Amino acid sequence: MKDRLCFYHTAVEAVGMCIHCHKPYCQACQVVTPYGKFCCHDCSGKYAAFKASWKEPKLRSPWLGPLLSGLILLALLAIVAAWAGHRFLGISALAPFDVISRFFR
Ligand SMILES: [Zn+2]
Ligand SMILES: [Zn+2]
């Protein structure tokens, strides 16, 4: 980096390169964050937002959690409804779906 000059101070030698915009920066411009070193606070903020918004969808979709718990809740409700309908209301058509009675006879 010795041969490069700061993007903002063209008379000052650069000490590194911004990992967001790839501009060279000097010691005075340098912004150090847990994400890395940047040329300005604007870049560090943008990079942090970029990291935060791109890390999440890769780990798991935001709608997958509620969808799965919704499906599980729906299945539980169906099982309970079939059990109650068969047991207490005497609906024989629900007998094949009465999983609870089959297990706890
Ligand atoms: Zn930058
Ligand atoms: Zn500078």
Image (spheres, grey):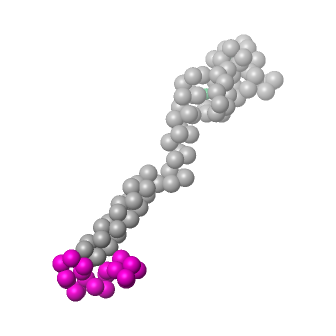
Tell me where residue 77 appears, x and y as whole percent. 30, 67
- Is 84 on the left or on the right of 59, as rendered? left
Tell me where residue 21 appears, x and y as whole percent. 61, 32
- Is 58 on the left or on the right of 29, as rendered? left
Camera-nearest residue between 27 and 63: 63
At 61% from the left and 33% from the top, the residue drawn is 20
Quadrant location, the N terminus: top right
Quadrant location, the C terminus: bottom left
Above or below: residue 64 compared with residue 78: above
Q: Residue furthest front?
A: 105
- Magenta span covers which residues? 85-105
Q: Is residue 89 magenta?
A: yes
Residue 42: quadrant of the picture: top right
At 53% from the left and 39% from the top, the residue drawn is 52
Residue 101: quadrant of the picture: bottom left
Camera-nearest residue between 39 and 6: 39
Camera-nearest residue between 7 and 41: 41
Tell me where residue 45 appears, x and y as whole percent. 54, 28
At 70% from the left and 29% from the top, the residue drawn is 17
Judged from the image, the quadrant occupied by ligand 1 is top right
Q: Is residue 103 magenta?
A: yes
At 38% from the left and 65% from the top, the residue drawn is 72
Residue 92: quadrant of the picture: bottom left
Can residue 50 be seen by looking at this rendering? yes
Magenta part, dominant SS: helix
Q: Residue furthest right?
A: 2
Above or below: residue 101 compared with residue 10: below
Tell me where residue 63 appears, x and y as whole percent. 40, 54
